[in-house]
Amino acid sequence: MPDGKIYQSDIPSPVGSRRHYFAVQNLDEYRLSLDELRAGQNESINELPEDVKSLYLPLILGLLEMDPEKRLAVEEISQGPYSEVMNVD
């Protein structure tokens, strides 16, 4: 709302509304996709060479983590074990 206007997307969706239904459905699909990724059932990731997969999969899962307490932050990626992946010195 930097321009001072209120847009439809700024208004919270009431529970039971069509917008709320699609938001919940999309969240469920996201969770299922994460579960497949964790279980090694993601076709795109499985096609990667094992060394690439083992290097990047923990990073991808860390960035996509639903729990904000467990989710990787950009600062964490540029330091420690991930700095090599990011080519940060």
Image (cartoon, rainbow, N blue to C red):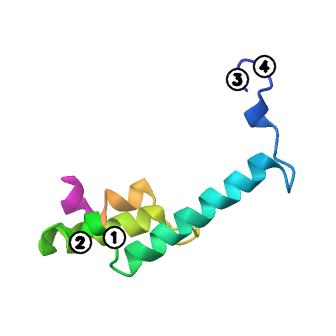
Secondary structure category for the residue under label 1: loop
Q: Mark 1 Cα within 10 Å, few/some/many (few <14, many 20+)?
A: some
The CA distance from mark 2 to mark 1 is: 6 Å
Secondary structure category for the residue under label 3: loop
Q: Nearer the viewer, residue 6 or 85?
A: 6
Q: Nearer the viewer, residue 20 or 70?
A: 20
Dot 4 or dot 2, earlier in sequence: 4
Magenta-drawn stretch contains 86: yes
Tag 4 and tag 2, C-beta contact below 8 Å: no
Q: Nearer the viewer, residue 69 or 14?
A: 14
Q: Which residue is found at the position 83% from the left and 50% from the top? A: 17
Where 9 falls versus 26 (above or below)?
Answer: above
Residue ID for mark 2? 46
The CA distance from mark 3 to mark 2 is: 43 Å
Q: Which residues are magenta?
A: 82-88
Q: Mark 4 Cα within 10 Å, few/some/many (few <14, many 20+)?
A: few
Residue ID for mark 3? 2
Q: Tell me the quarter of the picture where residue 54 sits.
A: bottom left
Residue ID for mark 4? 4
Amino acid type at image mark 4:
Gly
